[in-house]
Amino acid sequence: PKHALIQNGIVQPFDAKDEQHHPHNAKDTSTSMAFVYPNGTTLSVESPSFTLLSSGSVSYPVDCPVAAAWEATAGSGRLIVVGSADIFADEWLEREDNSKICDIFFNFLLHQVTIDPSLGRCDFEAKECVPDI
């Protein structure tokens, strides 16, 4: 996606230990957060990694992973990969819910948010590249 507003791209429900950063409440749930995805690419995510954000159903390519995470089984290592270097840049951070997603990602990396991959979607199909004719 070049500059995409993604309204249904949250794949994983987020569970925060700290209620201040908890996106689940009556007015705003993590699955209803919208984000702007500028100048990005899609990702190929394989187990044991899991998808955090997708391109949603209205941007092209449809329903492809755009952010993923990995958590070490031994030790406390965590990693998040996002296909856009600009999503959290100054120009885009305050748009839609980008800053909330940034906070959730950093809280996950700091072990203040837990993400259970079994609760989210993992049914992303492998996309086949077809050349333009």
Image (spheres, rainbow, N blue to C red):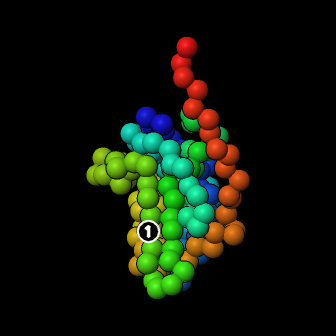
Residue 88 % position (x, y): 35, 54
Q: Which element type, helix, strand or loop, lies under badge 1? A: strand
**In the figure, is residue 50 to the left or right of 92?**
right
Number of residues whose C-alpha sits closer than 10 Å to that of mark 1, classed few (under 14), some (14–19) or many (20 or more): few
Occupied quadrant, residue 81 = bottom left
**Figure disc tally:** 1
Who's the residue at 69% across and 68% down the image? 119
Name which residue type carries label 1.
Answer: Leu
Who's the residue at 50% across and 55% down the image? 67
Quarter of the image where the C terminus is located: top right
Residue situated in front as seen by the camera: 84 or 71: 71
**In the figure, is residue 101 to the left or right of 39?**
right
Residue 106 % position (x, y): 40, 70
Note whether 59 is above or below 32 in the view shown: above
Who's the residue at 68% across and 58% down the image? 122
Residue 30 appears anywhere in the view:
no
Residue 18 % position (x, y): 50, 82
Residue 73 % position (x, y): 54, 80
Note whether 55 is above or below 103 in the view shown: above
Note whether 88 is above or below 21 in the view shown: above
Residue 67 appears anywhere in the view:
yes
Who's the residue at 57% across and 32% down the image? 129
Residue situated in front as seen by the camera: 25 or 62: 62
**In the figure, is residue 37 to the left or right of 13?**
left
> Which residue is outermost to the bottom?
75
Residue situated in front as seen by the camera: 1 or 70: 70
- Residue annotated with mark 1: 79
> Which residue is outermost to the top?
133
